[in-house]
Amino acid sequence: MTEYRTPYPVRVDAVQDAPSRALWLIKWLLLIPHLFVLFFLWVAFCVVTVIAFFAILFTGRYPRSLFDFNVGVLRWSWRVHYYGYGANGTDRYPPFTLDEVPDYPAHLDVAYPERLSHGLIFVKWLLAIPHLIVLSVFVGGGLWLGTRGGTGNGWDNGWGAGGGLVALLVLIAAIVLLFTGRYPQPLYDFVLGMDRWVLRVAAYTSLMTDSYPPFRLDLGGTDPGSVPVGPSGPPPVGTPAAPPWTAAAPGR
């Protein structure tokens, strides 16, 4: 019988795409158009989250069109983050779209919740405090940009703006890449694990799921919820379907 890892509703996948030795030196300049657009998208994200708050309070549902928009903002931010200094995992310029792009090496999906708790919306920020303490080590001051999407701020300047372990490890990996032409795999896997943790907490605090984020550093580019542990076979009833890009993604 096929054994599946317990999937979390926020699925984050990536494929290392042979970044060049030196392009990272000017990516800050290349990212300016994206950061400009993302500033306005995150303003909209915050407005949509406030509207969703009241919709969940009175109906127990997150309006689907609003949910899809906010997932798109997270997805766009993740692609920019992956291209830039949150991972430096590819030199392929991120597309200007909220939609999933199957052939881009960074992917994000959030399972739509049919029902959400009326009461949890008031305390999710409080319940997330243990995560925020842990993640403050990962992304430093940038954590507050990445987790206040429901209270008036977002990743408009890219999470990790305040430094932290992610920024330090990406810098070390970039220097190694500059001199050797190789991205150290252990650093890549660890950075992706931290990025995945941040995105899970960001979606939770933005009211997109009631599933409490696991205290788990899932290393590597392939999300544990995307692949079975054992031989291939049909997933159990209720397991979210694997996205189309995972067929080409390497296992961990």
Image: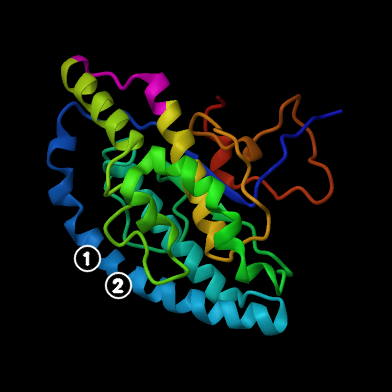
Vertical placement of residue 22 versus 197, above or below: above
Identify the residue position indicated by label 2 in the image: 40
Q: Residue furthest right?
A: 1
The answer to whether residue 181 is magenta is yes
Q: Percent x, y for residue 88?
A: 29, 36
Would you say 160 lies left or right of 33 here?
Answer: right
Q: Residue at x 36, y 67 (%)?
A: 153
Q: CA distance from mark 1 to mark 2?
A: 7 Å
Would you call the spot at circle 2 few (<14 residues within 10 Å), some (14-19), or many (20 or more)? few
Vertical placement of residue 17 versus 127, above or below: above
Residues drawn in magenta? 180-188
Out of 219 and 112, give the one closest to the viewer. Answer: 219
Q: Percent x, y for residue 199?
A: 48, 50
Image quarter where the C terminus lies is top right
Would you say 236 lies left or right of 15 here?
Answer: right
Identify the residue position indicated by label 1 in the image: 36
Mark 1 falls on what kind of element? helix
Q: Please state which amino acid type lies under the numbered disc 1.
A: Phe
Q: Please state which amino acid type lies under the numbered disc 2.
A: Phe
Mark 2 falls on what kind of element? helix
Q: Residue at x 62, y 35 (%)?
A: 224
Out of 64 and 169, give the one closest to the viewer. Answer: 169
Q: Are marks 1 and 2 in contact (CB under 8 Å)?
A: yes
